[in-house]
Each structure stands twice: as structure tokens, then as C-alpha cells.
Image (cartoon, rainbow, N blue to C red):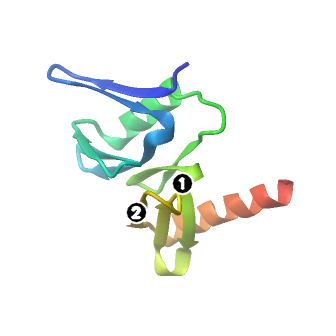
Amino acid sequence: MSDFLTISNNNELIRIKAESLVYVASDGNYSDIFTRDGEKRTVTLQLGVIEELINKQIRTSGIEFVRIGRSLIVNLGAVHYINPSKQQLVLSDNCSFKFALEASKEALRQLKEYFEQEQKRQ
């Protein structure tokens, strides 16, 4: 149980605080990790491997990550705007960072429904 995502290989070690991790995007055999401070780190791991690491390493209450389609893992706490018909997703804290992304209509529809169901439970 940790508050960090830790990725290590022969050359480097990367530790990212869970609440700083905004999203991870797939780029073939590479993954780009984006944090709240605007940093981008490219690692030589496929998105599925990063997803497994997040599930194993990050157990911080209140911080949840979900895979969106084939190419994104997002911090649910950073989701600001979803428009499935325009295939738009905006991740933001309304202050220090804003990332505008594209995702499939179906993936965004499912994400939108998730938040709608969460709202009904409250």
C-alpha cells in the first residue's frame, strides 16, 4: 500500500505521488505519464502494465484511476468535462492544470454514465 506509483528500470526510477498523477496515455510500447505540474514522463511500458502497477501500488483512499478505451488511464478526481458526441474529455482542477483529450464515444459515454450513477447514489 502506497501513496506513490513507482516505476523502475535499468536506467532510472520514477516515483509519482498518487494525487499528482492526472493521466497516462498509450503510445505503442511506450506510455506517457502526465502530472498536475504539467510534466510528461515517457516510460517503456505498455499501458496494460502501467494499469497493473497502479492497481497494485496505489491504494490511497479517495483517489481512483480508470482505464478509458485502449489508450488512456485517468484520475477520476481530475475529470472536469465529458462530451461523448464530440469525443472530448477535459481533466482539470480549475486552477493549476488543464488537459484536453480525445477518446472514443463509447468510452466517454461509459465514463459519463459512471458519474451520473455516482451522483444518484449521493
What's the residue at 47%, 73% (across, down)?
88
Give the quadrant of residue 6. Answer: top left
Mark 2 nearby-residue class (10 Å; few <14, some 14–19, many ≥20): some
Real-space Cα separation, disc 2 to disc 1, in angstroms? 9 Å
> Measured from the top left, where is residue 23 in percent x and y?
42, 49
Q: Identify residue for label 2.
A: 99
The type of residue carrying mark 2 is Phe
The type of residue carrying mark 1 is Ala
> Measured from the top left, where is residue 78 in percent x and y?
54, 54
Specify whether 118 is left or right of 79: right
Q: SS at mark 2?
A: strand
Mark 1 nearby-residue class (10 Å; few <14, some 14–19, many ≥20): many
Marks 2 and 1 close (CB-CB < 8 Å)? yes
Specify whether 76 is left or right of 122: left
Disc number placed over residue 102 in the picture, else none:
none
Location of residue 74 with respect to 107 vertically, above or below: above
